[in-house]
């Protein structure tokens, strides 16, 4: 075919199917979204942790921007992932906690078995705009035997865990979890190499540092100085957790190096964050390693206090995102990434069959276009952020157990139970620890935010709530009438638990 006829054929193809247009000069950026699992705001060196080694993420932070007021949409994994995919608060989708694969868990929690592919998703949006889309690592948006695999959401290539379809390579091998980030990055690098002419959207969703953690002896050796003292023959919790974080950091560095080797750095946006706060020691899988930290914030995984939903955010795009800057003012949410990627990728929003009227003129979306903020122009957000966590927080100490609803608007954050049994108002800019309840001082703010939160709460799908949802009651010692039965009960207890 002559050059002229080849060009004519390409033009004709573009007119028939614009998404199939071949454009060697396509300047739209590649997008790499890295999502860690259960990593806290304070678990990186560049976010203030002086004990953990994260040199590659620190370097990425200094080459780009850090955002200190970035929020996920839930204190647990599946809802946050659904929020990223749809740009909507996950409670509106009926996804309230982790989606499991078997049994009656999902039904008992009033949830579907998977995220419906009928919703508009960010992967579908970019795919339809001509992006190659890859997802590698943890999926957790449906692994029921009948669940669709990631390919049903506009994903071209995938190898995932907690999903149907192809698994991450080497799944089930010894020390798989310890090496899982390496295997995920292997898949991701192959995807980049196959799509280096771009544009592509790459999702790298690590399995770690979600427990249970079992780092290799080599990984642990980096933190030998944190081993327990006194000659005890055990590995320390700090060793286990930090060895895992450093292993993640090393593999992210390998991914960034390959992007550089292929000459793609200047046209690739790389974003790093986590799905929710760190798990604590009271959860059995993390009972040997649950020392992750929310940094300057109260709360952990399962909590709506800041440490459960406020995550580190690093964005790098040389020549577009200012290097070395920290944005302490802009309030961003994971629900903002769909409309933001729509702008950055020049991928116009298209209504999905189940979309409803949204808050920003985009049907079905709760998020805002924050592309200007990510590119270095701080500003206030227009709409408030909403959260609901309707299940138990039994794995948390009392101080971390939050009410079941929360709303953030401006500097104010209100947490409350729908029956008003708990009402807490914090200025989370001046009081990052959420220790000084200002509800009595600002009844007008409480009334305004509570009205908005309760109206939203009433609009959510009907479903079950845990009996202790939103409670922080401690079993305080009570006086009893001493009789002969008390010593007998104590003796029985000693025999049962010597």
Image (cartoon, grey):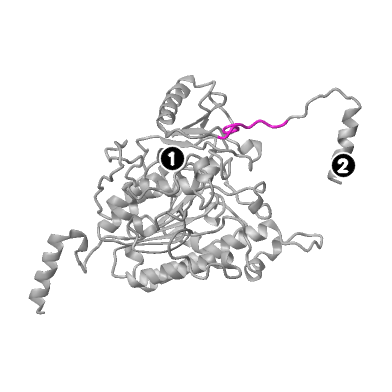
Counting from the top left corner in percent of width and height, residue 36 is at 50, 56
Residue neighbourhood size for the residue with mark 2, other residues' Cα within 10 Å, grouped as few (<14), some (14–19), many (≥20) = few
Above or below, 281 against 255 in this view is: above
- Label 1, on which residue? 94
- Label 2, on which residue? 494
Most extreme residue toward the bottom, as rendered? 1
Q: Main secondary structure of the magenta part?
A: loop
Above or below, 456 against 247 in this view is: above
Residue 131 shown left or right of residue 240 in the figure: left
Q: Quadrant of the N terminus?
A: bottom left
Above or below, 368 against 17 in this view is: above
Q: Secondary structure at mark 1?
A: loop
Residue placed at 84% from the left, 44% from the top? 496
Indicate the quadrant where residue 7 lies. bottom left
Which one is earlier in the sequence, the residue at label 1 or at label 2?
A: 1
Task: Tell me if residue 470 is in the magenta stretch.
Answer: yes
Give the magenta part as a residue range: 466-475
Between the C-alphas of marks 1 and 2, the distance is 46 Å
Counting from the top left corner in percent of width and height, residue 80 is at 45, 47
């Amino acid at each position: 075919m002559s050059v002229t006829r080849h060009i004519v054929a390409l033009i004709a193809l573009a007119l028939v199917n614009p998404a199939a247009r071949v454009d060697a000069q396509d300047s739209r950026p590649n997008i790499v979204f890295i999502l860690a699992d259960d990593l806290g705001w304070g678990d990186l060196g560049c976010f203030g942790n002086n004990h953990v080694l994260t040199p590659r993420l620190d370097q990425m932070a200094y080459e780009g921007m850090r955002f200190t007021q970035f929020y996920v949409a839930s204190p647990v994994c599946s809802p946050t992932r659904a929020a990223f995919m749809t740009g909507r608060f996950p409670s509106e989708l009926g996804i309230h906690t982790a989606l499991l694969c078997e049994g009656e868990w999902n039904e008992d929690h009033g949830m579907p078995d998977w995220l419906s592919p009928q919703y508009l998703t960010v992967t579908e949006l970019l795919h339809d705009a001509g992006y190659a889309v890859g997802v590698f690592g943890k999926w957790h948006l449906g692994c029921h035997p009948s669940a669709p695999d990631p390919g049903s959401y506009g994903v071209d290539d995938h190898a995932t865990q907690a999903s149907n379809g192809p698994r991450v390579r080497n799944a089930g091998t010894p020390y798989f979890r310890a090496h899982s980030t390496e295997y995920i990055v292997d898949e991701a690098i192959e995807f980049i190499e196959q799509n280096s002419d771009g544009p592509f959207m790459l999702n790298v969703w690590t399995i770690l540092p979600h427990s249970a953690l079992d780092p290799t002896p080599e990984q642990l050796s980096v933190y030998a100085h944190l081993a327990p003292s006194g000659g005890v023959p055990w590995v320390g919790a700090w060793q286990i957790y930090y060895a895992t974080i450093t292993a993640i950091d090393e593999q992210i560095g390998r991914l960034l190096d390959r992007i550089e080797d292929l000459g793609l750095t200047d046209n690739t946006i790389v974003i790093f964050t986590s799905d929710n706060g760190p798990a604590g020691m009271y959860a059995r899988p993390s009972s040997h390693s649950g020392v992750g930290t929310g940094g300057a914030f109260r709360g952990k995984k399962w909590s709506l206090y800041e440490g459960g939903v406020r995550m580190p955010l690093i964005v790098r795009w040389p020549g577009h995102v200012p290097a070395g800057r920290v944005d302490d003012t802009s309030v961003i949410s994971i629900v903002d990434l769909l409309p933001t990627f729509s702008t950055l990728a020049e991928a116009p929003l298209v209504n999905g069959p189940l979309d409803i009227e949204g808050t920003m003129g985009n049907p079905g979306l709760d998020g805002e276009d924050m592309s200007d903020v990510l590119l270095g122009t701080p500003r206030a957000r227009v709409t408030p952020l909403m959260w609901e966590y309707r299940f138990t927080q039994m794995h948390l100490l009392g101080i971390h157990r939050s009410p079941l609803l929360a709303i953030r608007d401006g500097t104010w954050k209100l947490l409350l139970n729908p029956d008003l049994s708990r009402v807490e108002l914090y200025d989370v800019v001046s009081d990052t620890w959420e220790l000084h309840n200002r509800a009595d001082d600002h009844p007008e703010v409480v009334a305004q935010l509570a009205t908005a939160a309760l109206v939203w709460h009433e609009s959510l799908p009907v479903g079950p709530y845990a009996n202790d949802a939103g409670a922080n009651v401690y079993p305080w010692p009570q006086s009893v009438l001493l009789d002969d039965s008390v010593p007998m009960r104590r003796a029985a207890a000693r025999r049962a638990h010597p």
